[in-house]
Amino acid sequence: MERFGPSRHHQPHGDARRRIRLSGIGIDQVTEQQAVARVLDAIDSGRGGQIVTPNVDIMAAARCSRELRTIIEASDLVVADGAPLVWASKLAGTPLPERVAGSDLVWSLSEAAAGRGLKVALLGGTPDGAARPTERAADRLERRYPGLKVVGAWCPPMGFDRDESQWRALTDRFDAAAPDLVYVGLGFPKQEHVMVRLRATAPQSWFLGCGASIDFIAGYRRRAPKWMRRSGTEWLFRLLSEPRRLAGRYLLNDIPEAVKLLAGAAGQRRG
């Protein structure tokens, strides 16, 4: 297995009528398994795509940026990563069936890929000196799902997407590896910008923006217990795990944004 660590927006292939709207953003009404099935069907048909996983933080950023809204709207699959989005959809009278977290999709897509003989690549993770989180994540996925074909794992340095030589080296590796699925864990919105550009190089690949998922898989960060994920309190676990880094984001930005989202959804239903 090799270790390796602006194009136009593509129009989504999914049925846009199945998208509900929250704060002006369309979100697909799918379960995790339905999302996986949609990706597999597209791959079988020779179509690539892009998955974006909005949470409260992403919704707030998209509301303030037309460019980010365009990227999300043009994505082939948009799933609700944050529990407040599911709650808001119910208040609005257009309920989403469940939360579909990017950190869960990497596992379910990998399981499906192993069964289909599909090729997977990982891009991202948090560089940590000599540590190689992306390689470790790739090894764990291969052990978990025997037969999984991980054809690339690269943890890029800061600024790789602005360095022409590094970017060209990455696209050359993508050309050689020809992955069916690519997990991009660079954080929003960088990972979304990178996915849009890479789709020009690998138009038949599916890209999943998965945030901290590579670090979770590698064991470099701990994910919340399942009961916290189900109850919508995973954010609290992450806050307590990394208070210095996340306190401002969660307490000053995300909680007020969640309240605004829920209030807007309730008003949308009354209207």
Image (spheres, rainbow, N blue to C red):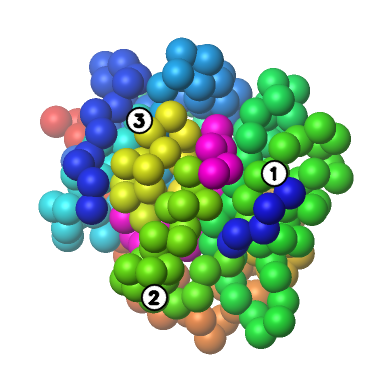
What label does residue 224 carry, if any? none
Query: Disc 2 designates what residue?
Result: 159
The residue at 53%/86% (across/down) is 244
The residue carrying pointer 3 sits among few (fewer than 14), some (14 to 19) or many (20 or more) residues within 10 Å by Cα, namely: many
Is 99 on the left or on the right of 194, as rendered? right
Residue 188 or residue 261, whichever sits in front = 188
Q: Nearer the viewer, mark 3 or mark 1?
A: 1
Q: Earlier in the sequence, mark 3 or mark 1?
A: 3
The residue at 54%/62% (across/down) is 124
Q: Distance between the residues labelled 2 and 1?
A: 25 Å
Q: Can residue 184 be found in the magenta stretch?
A: yes
Q: What stretch is highlighted in magenta?
A: 176-193
Q: Can residue 117 be seen in this view?
A: yes
Q: Distance between the residues labelled 2 and 3?
A: 27 Å
Image mark count? 3
Marks 2 and 3 in Cβ contact (< 8 Å): no
Amino acid on which the number 2 mark rests in the picture = Gly
Picture coordinates of residue 104, whole percent (x, y): 63, 42
What label does residue 150 carry, if any? 1
